[in-house]
Amino acid sequence: MEFNATCKKIKDLKIQGATNVAVSAVEALSSLIEKSKAGTKAKLVSEIEAGKKKLFELRATEPMMRNFLNFVHARALVGKDVKEMKKEAKRAAKEALMMKEAAKQAIVKIGAGLIEEGSIVYTHCHASTVTGILKEAAKTKKFEVYNTETRPRFQGRITAEELAKAKIPVTHFVDSAVKFAMRKADIMMIGADAITPMGVYNKIGSGLFAELAKKYDVPVYVCSVSWKFDPESIFGHEEVIEERNPNEVWDRVPKSVRVRNYAFEKVIPENVSAIVSELGIYNNDTFIEETKKKYPWMFLRH
């Protein structure tokens, strides 16, 4: 995929979702490296760093994308010359995408075991890990799903449509009616855009709904690949909450009205029962320890 065209699509939100953004970004950087006319290793390194920087700046809350790009960058540096660097980068990009797919399949199997026969599962927004878990569980169990619309871009509708297509009973609620959904739910499952020691960042509403889940004694499971952990957070970096165009909320808003359109918010560790990843089911601290054991390179400063 052409590098600048991909950057524009990510910036314009035509490519959405942490996994889709990460995959598109790594494919774009890989293409940039492959098409480079750099004659020296130093020149190619400079081009890779510039491309990576541009992609980093497109979206604030995307550690999975940053981890993917750092992985490709680090592997490219192993090459002794331009030809070897290109070969290593291409191989690394392919490995990253294969690991992503393998991780998702593992999460689907692990997460499906948490859903009980006859239960009601609540979810918010759209996460391919969660819908994958639900479709896997539906192969052997009957249950119902309650989900919320997820204003202002209504990603919850994507979830509802996907589940309905899979013949899974689903009831769709407006966000402000979440109390009616939660008080009947047996389990809450959401995805993640970023995981840090301070909590999980996910679509706006997730933090508030997790607090409500705790009030109703509904366990909250975050279903995510471990590559969404932000290693910079252990060095004091705090996730920047992305704010999007106010027109998404209110088109032709009166000049005297200010609109805040936060895309994400933090779910504090105290409100998360466990993180379900390809590494297993762990609390926040243990998840980070297991991620470090599996991917020690991720915890190096880049």
Image (cartoon, rainbow, N blue to C red):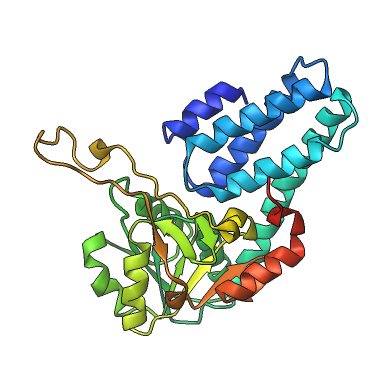
Measuring 43% from the left and 49% from the top, which residue is drawn there? Answer: 240
Camera-side residue of 139 and 96: 96
Task: Point out the residue furthest to the front here.
Answer: 236
| 289 left or right of 75 in image | left
Give the mark count. 0
Q: Is residue 122 visible?
A: yes
Q: Position of residue 293 (x, y in %)?
A: 75, 66
Q: Position of residue 189 (x, y in %)?
A: 46, 69
Q: Position of residue 84 (x, y in %)?
A: 88, 29
Give the image quarter of residue 218: bottom left
Q: Is residue 234 left or right of residue 240?
A: right
Q: Can see residue 93? A: no
Q: Quadrant of the N terminus?
A: top right
The C terminus: image quadrant: top right
Name the image quarter holding residue 257: top left
Q: Is residue 50 left or right of residue 253?
A: right
Specify the quadrant of the image occupied by residue 91.
Answer: top right
Give the residue at the far right of this rendering.
80
Q: Position of residue 202 (x, y in %)?
A: 43, 58
Note whether 232 is above or below 82 in the view shown.
Answer: below
Q: Is residue 77 above or below residue 185?
A: above
Q: Nearer the viewer, residue 239 or 193?
A: 239
Residue at the bottom extreme, as displayed: 217
- Residue at image location 49% in from the left, 72% down from the top: 221
Q: Residue at x 37, y 71 (%)?
A: 210
